[in-house]
Image (spheres, grey):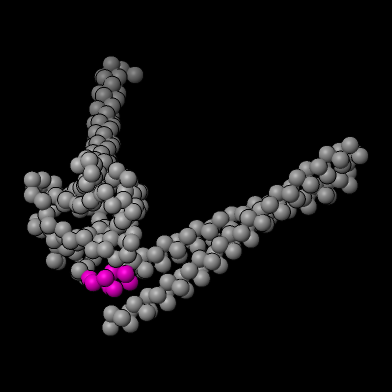
Amino acid sequence: MDKESLQLKVDDLKYKFQKNGAITYYLISGVIVIILIFFLSSNALFNREANLISSALNKPFLVDSINVDVTNREYNPENHLIQFNLKIDNLDINTDSNLSVELREKNNPNEIIPTKLVKVSDQDYIIYATLPEKKWSAVSLTFINKNNKTNEIKKVKFYSDSRDISIDNNLKEQNKEGLTIELVNEEIEKVKKEIKDNDIKIENKNKEIDSANSKITSLEKDKEYQTETEIATTDSTITSLKGQVDSLNKEVEKIKKDNKELNDKIDKLNKKKEDLEKMVK
């Protein structure tokens, strides 16, 4: 190969290297851009969740000696009505206490939004309020308990984010009967969930029973080829497994009994609901 031919080969290799190097560069750049977009979008989503200003529902808290549990919160964007469902214990028993609430919006924390507290039963209460702002970000519901004897004041805040509230375009203020129906429906759904959870427990325990019985069958077959000492050990294992099966069967029967009572409770709640609906009509 002469010098000229060799130079042509070298130039060709340089061209190919430069060409492929450019492609590799663009590929790497593209991958980096995709990774950056993924992490930025993931971070934005994470920050959105992290920045939610909401207290958990169905997590009771104490305001001095009074037990408060916010079980539901709803908002109607059409009329700007917000509703909180509460369960309050020890309110009537403790006559020295005076429980009140203050509602404020994050963008205007100095303004106290008027609220209406409706007693539905000894434990069930509803708070209504109309938010002045069409676009609100979060509200704080402050529970204030003042001891009439000592004048001592205890406060607990419950937060609700606009992104973490049930939207109901038909939400409106209701009378005591209407609210009672709503609470009965809420109770029915809770009982149904409890039954569903119990059904899952039964299913899982039945799987454990089937597994144990399968092991027992296998061990019984193994005894045919075992020595007396090995058989004694196998029999001990079989006895233990049979004990587990008996225990699991008892647990299943108990859960089934609980479910029967829960279904009876749903029937009673539906009857109560029907009677209330007649009163409303």
Which quadrant holds residue 38? top left
| Residue 44 horizontal/vertical position (percent) | 23, 42
> Magenta segment: does it hold 176?
yes
User: Residue 194 in the image: x percent, y percent?
Assistant: 47, 60
Q: Residue furthest top?
A: 3
User: Which residue is depicted at the point 28% across and 27% down?
Assistant: 17
Q: Is residue 269 above or below residue 199?
A: below
Report the side of 24 relative to 219 (left or right).
left
Location of the C terminus by quadrant is bottom left
Residue at the image point whose x is 26% and y is 70% from the top: 176
Rendered image quadrant of residue 114: bottom left
Query: Residues in magenta?
Result: 174-181
Residue 59 in view in this figure: yes
Q: Residue furthest front?
A: 149
Q: Nearer the viewer, residue 281 or 218?
A: 281
Nearest the camera: 211 or 142? 142
